Image (cartoon, helix red, strand yellow):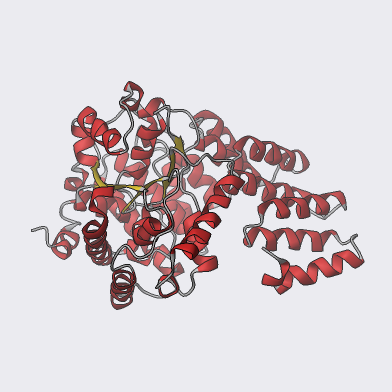
Amino acid sequence: MSDASDPRIAALRTMLAANPNRPDDWYDLGLLLKRARRYEEALKAYAEALKRKVERPEEVWLNRAVIHAEALGDPAQAAAELEKAIALNPAYASAWLNLGNLHEDRGAREEARKAYAKAREADPHDAMALMRLAEVTKFESVDDPMIAGMRQMASHPSAPAIGRADLNFTLGKVLDALEDYDAAWDAYAAGNAATIEMAKGPYDENAVEQVIDRLIEIFADRGDPAPAGEAAPIFILGMFRSGSTLAERILAAHSAVTAGGELEHLPALISDHLQPYPTAAAGLDAARHGELREVYLAGLRRQKFPLAGLTDKRPDNFLHVGLIKRLFPTAKIVHTVRNPMDNGLSIYFAHLHPSMRYAQRLESIAHWYRQYERLMDHWRSIYGEDILDFSYDRLVADPEPQIRRLLDFLELPFEAACLEPHAVTGVVRTASSWQVREPLYQRSSGRWHNYEKQLAPLREALGRG
């Protein structure tokens, strides 16, 4: 990508060519390059900022760490850069928080707890620090002082919406685990109310229906796909909180599979090359689909991922099955499904971004779910032989037959290691990071019955009796 695509980057380049001894401008260039997904160039710009003695260098090391962790898939390098930030400023709460996140991602609970405790020590008023510390703490009683502390901070008149959301979602999780279900529901409801405050407008049912209509119209058939390549990623998708992380962990236990996690490449491709979407995807020929596929593959090469046996697990890619199959006509789609009531409850209990406006109200969750079902029915009508509905509830009730079915669909030989996904090492960067490190369990199947009274609006809106 050239500098001409962003005049701000071009202007900074010109300025720095004339006078390179401007550390703040190198820092700004690094930020812009990161936003443009030009990660290696961003790292070089940040290095120049450090070389030229930028103020608050710990912030530069933190930004570099985020690139290594989230964009380049190198958590070890990310941790090393965070350690440099902490060495410069031991009271830098953000660096401790990010280091704790890295420990969580690899399943190191005690190391994460220590890092979050350091973040809380550095900034006792930081809601995020308290929230993350509570997330890795095992509570024995609702009378634990940390629970009281979360309640107090969440109810403080000056608490911002993001802080109230962070704390209340964690309170809900803690209280649910302690089986104080009414109090847990109240906390989750408060967390969702705070998230609504941060959203840029309400959920718009008509707009969502129009998007689904347009996707069905644009991708009405197989179109003119790119020539079939030698390999294609395994796309794992479905509703959020439907078991996609667990499905990926099962596959990651297989010797022929590499877990890619929540890759950004398809959404980035759409954002950069197919706007307005999906209109810009209409009528493309095989050559153009081949060019777009190469954009996706370039992202994999940047992260040093293999193509054969790679999983791309983004639940919301269910919106893009039509595009996926035009870029990768041989791709297999693993569609994770779950009891709609449990799925809806889990979405309501998930601390999702405010931009996911359907997730904060039971009625809008039900509406989004019905539209998702409508779109998946359409994809099945075209690509049914390449889509596997993989049921979370059937999996946890009787794992081996479902895992064999999954491997058969992907034309992979059975390996017993897939029966023990909790034993898989490696990074997990989702809300299910701790759950998938436990042996398969059934306690989340039918969990909605703990909240049957509160979930009456969801049940009615879903038409499930």
Q: Nearer the viewer, residue 248 or 150?
A: 248
Q: Nearer the viewer, residue 298 or 313?
A: 298
Report whether residue 442 is seen.
no
Q: Nearer the viewer, residue 263 or 150?
A: 263
Residue 86 placed where, x, y %?
71, 40
Image quarter for residue 211?
Answer: bottom left
Residue 190 placed where, x, y %?
36, 59
**In the displayed structure image, the side of residue 18 where residue 431 appears, left or right:** left
Report whether residue 178 is seen.
yes
Q: Which residue corresponds to the image point at 67% horizontal and 71% vertical from the top-left?
A: 5
Residue 419 placed where, x, y %?
30, 26
Relative to 170, say whether 75 is above or below.
above
Report the number of numbered marks: 0
Q: Quadrant of the C terminus?
A: bottom left
**In the displayed structure image, the side of residue 286 where residue 27 appears, left or right:** right
Relative to 83, say whether 416 is above or below.
above
Relative to 101, say whether 162 is above or below.
below
**In the displayed structure image, the side of residue 450 where residue 135 appears, left or right:** right
Image quarter for residue 26?
Answer: bottom right
| View extreme (left): residue | 465
Q: Quadrant of the N terminus?
A: bottom right
| View extreme (top): residue | 416
Q: Which residue corresponds to the image point at 77% horizontal and 55% vertical from the top-left?
A: 45
Q: Which residue corresponds to the image point at 34% horizontal and 52% vertical from the top-left?
A: 240
Residue 187 placed where, x, y %?
34, 54
Q: Which residue corresponds to the image point at 59% horizontal and 49% vertical from the top-left?
A: 71
